Amino acid sequence: MSKLTQTNSSAILLNQKNLCSLPHNVKIPSYDRSKLSAGIVHIGVGGFHRAHQAMYIDTLLQQPGSEQWGICGIGLLEGNRSLAEILKKQDYLYSLIVRHPDGKVENQVIGSLIDFIFAPDDKQAVINKLASEQTQIVSLTITEGGYNFNPATGEFDLSNPDILHDIANLNSPNTTFGYLTVALKIRMQQDIAPFSIQSCDNIQHNGAVTKKMLLAFIEQCDNELYAWVNENVSFPNGMVDRITPVTTANDIQYLAEDIGVVDEWPITCEAFTQWVIEDDFCNGRPNWNLAGAQFVTDVTPYEKMKIRLLNAGHSVLGLLGSIHGFDTIDESVNDPLFAEYLRVFMDKEVTPLLEQLEGIDLTQYKDTLIERFSNPNIKDSLSRICLESSAKLPKFLIATIMENIAKNPTQPNIEFATLVIAAWCYYSDKQVNQNGQSLDIQDQMATTLNQHASKTESNPLAFLDITELFGDLNNQPEFCKIYKNSIEAVYDNQLSIKTVMQQVIDSKGL
C-alpha cells in the first residue's frame, strides 16, 4: 500500500483515541468497541471483506445485543505484513469511502474488526484463536484460487506443494485448510462445539465447495476427524456482491486533504451491496438480516444469477476492454459498443439459463449492473478484473458456454462468450493491447496460459488444450468452429477488437 506523502496539517490520525475528534461528516461507530468479543475469525482481510461482511457487522453492532460478533482478522501470507502493521497502528479501524454514481460520497469508519493475527510471525496464535470456544464462525475471502481445486474437474489438488507441506506438518500449517484442520482437531479432542465455516468468495456453491475441499484435505490426515467434521460442521452457501476496487494513493490523499482523516489503508466501494445467506450454522450466527442481508433456504439460483451476469460481465468488459486499451471498467461500459455487446451477451446467452427468482426482476437487475459498471466514481481497474482469470472464467463464463451447448448442441447460443475466450487467448499470448502497451497480467497459471496461447497462430485450438480449464470444449465441433472464427478475427492485425465485436453483433441480426 502506498503511504501518504503529504497531508492536511490539521488532518487527524485514525485511531480509537481520536474517533470522537473526527470531522462531523464522517460517520463513526456508535457502539462501545471495548465491549466487543470476536465470535467471528476471518481469513483473508482484503478490501472486499472490509467493504462487505465487516460493514454488515458494523451496521448490526449499531443495535445493542450483538457484541459477541466482533471480527478477528487473520493474515496467512507474508504479503499481509503491511496490512497487519497499519491495522494495529489504527486500532483495527479503517475508513470506508462509498461512492455513488451521481457523485455523492459517504465516509464512515468501520469498527467491527477488533484484532488481527499475522500468521507468519505467530502460527500458534492463529491456531489458538481458531480453536477457542469463543470462535463460532470462521469466514473466508481467500479468492477462487485459494480453494485449491482443479477448475475442470472440481477435485482437490493434492499436488500443491503447500498442501503437501501441511499434510506432513499439520502443527505448522501454511494454508487455510491446514489451519482449519488443526483447529477443528483440537476442538474435537477437547469436546468443544465446532465453528461454522462461511465462504464469502465469488464461487458458486461456495459453502459446498469449501466443505468438499476441506474434507479432501482432512481425509489425507485423520479419518476420525473427517467423520466428525462431515457430521458436525456447517458450511453455509452464500452470494456476495459489492464492487470494491483496489485502494489507491488517491483514496488516501482524498481522505487526508478533503476530509481531514489520515488513514493509511481506506477502502473504496460502490453504494450497492447484496448478501444472500443459506441459514445453516452449527454454532450460532449474527442476525445479519437486521443489517440488510437476506437468509434463504437455497442460495443456488441467486449465486448463478450473480456469477453468470455480474462476474461474467466483468470478465467480458475486462478482457475485451484490456485488448482495446481501456484501463477501467467504467471506461469500457461507457463505450456504447461495449455496453451493447455486454447487454446482448446477458440477454441472449445468460438469461435463458436462469430461473425467475421471487423478488428479483432480471431486466431491472441487468439495468442496475450496467449502471453500477458505469459509475465514474468507481475506478475499478481492468487489471484487477482480469486478476486470476484462470480461477474465475471456468465458473463465470465457460460454464455458460457448456450449458448452452448441452441445451442445443447443433446451434448453441455461444458467439458472444466464445469471442471473450478468444480474447483471453490473445491477452495471454501477446500480453499487450492493440496499441502495443503492456498488460498487467496476474494469474497463477500465467506461464501455462502463455505457453498454450503462443501456439495459436500455428494451431488455432492450442489454447483449448488446457483441459483443466476448458474440459472437453476442444472436442465440441460447433464450439471449435465458432472459436476458430473468433481467433482468426482477433488475431487479424487489420481488425480492431471493436470491429470484431460489431461483427459478432451483426452476425446475430441485432
Image (cartoon, rainbow, N blue to C red):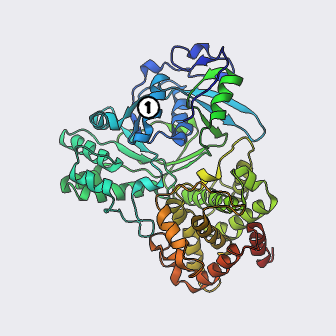
Quadrant of the image occupied by residue 107:
top right
Q: Quadrant of residue 193?
A: top left
* Quadrant of the frame with the C terminus: bottom right
Left or right: 344, with 115 as reference point: right
Q: Is residue 484 above or below residue 49?
A: below
Task: Using residue 169 as the reference point, say whether residue 282 is left or right of it.
Answer: right
Q: Nearer the viewer, residue 398 or 347?
A: 398
Work out whether 264 lies above or below 197.
above
Identify the residue under disc 1.
84
* Vertical arrangement, residue 507 with respect to residue 42, above or below: below
Question: Percent x, y for residue 342?
Answer: 72, 62
Indicate the amino acid at tag 1.
Ala
Using residue 476 as the reference point, say whether residue 75 is left or right of it: left
Residue at coordinates 68% horizontally, 17% vertically from top-left? 24
Horizontal and vertical percent position of residue 241: 59, 48
- Residue at horizontal 42%, vertical 20%? 35
Q: Secondary structure at mark 1?
A: helix
* Quadrant in which the N terminus is drawn: top right
> In this view, which residue lies farthest toward the front?
436
Residue 269 lies, in percent from the top left, at 63, 39
Q: Is residue 118 above or below residue 481?
A: above
- Residue 304: x percent and y percent? 56, 60
**Residue 379 seen in this snapshot:** yes
